[in-house]
Image (spheres, rainbow, N blue to C red):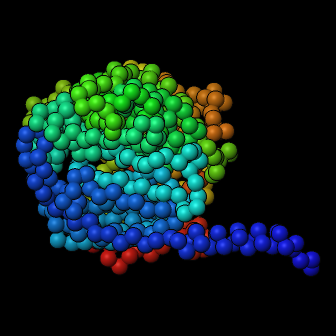
Amino acid sequence: MASLPPILLSFSILICISFLSSFASAELHVREFVIEARPVKRLCRTHQTITVNGQFPGPTLEVRNGDSLAITVVNKARYNISIHWHGIRQLRNPWADGPEFITQCPIRPGQSYTYRFTIEGQEGTLWWHAHSRWLRATVYGALIIYPRLGSPYPFPMPKRDIPILLGEWWDRNPMDVLRQAQFTGAAPNVSDAYTINGQPGDLYRCSRRGTLRFPVFPGETVQLRLINAAMNQELFFAVANHRLTVVEVDSAYTKPFTTNVVMIAPGQTTNVLLTANQRPGRYYIAARAYNSANAPFDNTTTTAILEYVNAPRRTAHVFPRLPGFNDTATVTAFTNRLRSVRREGLPLEIDENLFFTVGLGLINCSNPNSPRCQGPNGTRFAASMNNVSFVLPSRNSLMQAYYQGKRGVFTTDFPPVPPVKFDYTGNVSRGLWQPSRGTKVYKLKYKAKVQIVLQDTSIVTAENHPMHLHGYQFYVVGSGFGNFDPKRDPAKFNLVDPPERNTIGTPPGGWVAMRFIADNPGIWFMHCHIDSHLGWGLAMALLVENGKGELQTVQPPPLDLPRC
């Protein structure tokens, strides 16, 4: 057998050393998250707020692709809790995913659980949050994944990173807001403020002193890592007089493009580059609602300040121009510009062609005048996918029941298409407004090539529903307004450079199509990331069967998995 020339041999050795060193440099991050109530003052009032390690928002986790994490969550609060690592694929490891009663039972007061997982082939901005009722209103933080050592960004290296977490604040206990809505059947009260890294900003009472200032040097480029941690609201975001270059969404790099405004839905992340190329001064960073539904919303604006280090002591603050709250045209134009830099794992042929309606509904009451029926016309609000309003188990998690072979917790008959075909975005008969209730999953073969079309409905109101799929990244191959046409619309799909996401909004009164390969066995939650809708039942789960062999099979559960 002929030997390699010396140059090729040296090059091969360098490649091997580089490959091995990338794994040798991987770290194990051991952290403790103590969940407890601490006094937090906002809007002139102090509340006993559920925090992590006494911080609101919680601590930022900074890791690299290939690193492992062991996060022990110690529950010293009075509520059950679980933590979801939003966007982490958790390959073969649903036990670390976190949604209560889906992949685990909650961590009860006085108990603890260690989430152990490895970052495999992911980098960018993600986040973590409570996945137990409304605790994520204050229990959340950033999860930043840097490239492996020696691996560059696919764009010029920014001078530094600035995490921007957008949130919502209630001037009362969020769990009490939820409890009231669950009792009355009406929509929950809207928030009292939006926040940037936990602070409302200059435009709210008693908030000016806490307004955040982000210093920049003239000419430098910084990377803003935007995270929408709001409970129930999509948001417009802008920085006065500064263009933003989008380079990543949901931990997937995009072909760069510049914009004056970003629309970001609950659950989504967006990385933008900002160059400090304006006259030295103080420029407002601002976010306010994009509201596509015919429903009440928090019509206020949160602010922070981009401050040039050489700004004159006395200079006027410049405010950005933000779109109107119902500017769907701007949202559509922004979304349509997103393009992926890769298409690895994009199925061009389909094994499973699924069509899911998503939307609201109403449950009729036998006594419409009851204090428990305060929704429209004496009803209770509901929500559903394919007319099934998801019921969360209460005695066992779906994943544990599946792994243990226990029956009676869920069924596998979630419909692949709506039980009744109708004009989804037209004038829908009132007979279709009340969904059925059930704990249903849809079963997929391992490595199935899946397409899901999510169709918004006009029941109650058309709306942009940000749908999140746990355990997967998917490609958004198409979207449009009106009813999806299976004969004509697929011809317009983008199969060249579709954006890759883990959370995608359905256009109000429209549809969106996603594709992925079902290569991660386990049970994976799919739900609207507007938490009021999730509580009403806008959810389902995918059961991806094991493949062949250990590397295609769900790993055994950890010994300290919370008991049910």
Residue at the left extreme, as displayed: 45
> Is 267 left, or right, of 75 in this rendering?
right
Q: Nearer the viewer, residue 408 or 526?
A: 526
> Is 52 left, or right, of 429 in this rendering?
left
> Is 332 left, or right, of 83 in this rendering?
right
Q: Nearer the viewer, residue 505 or 327?
A: 327
Residue 510, image x, y percentages: 47, 28
Q: Quadrant of residue 328?
A: top left
Q: Residue at x 32, y 30 (%)?
A: 281
Quarter of the image with the N terminus is: bottom right
Residue 246, image x, y percentages: 50, 37
Q: Residue at x 83, y 69 (%)?
A: 7
Q: Residue at x 56, y 41 (%)?
A: 254
**Is 61 above or below relative to 312?**
below
Residue at the right extreme, as displayed: 2
Q: Quadrant of residue 101?
A: bottom left
Q: Residue at x 40, y 60 (%)?
A: 62
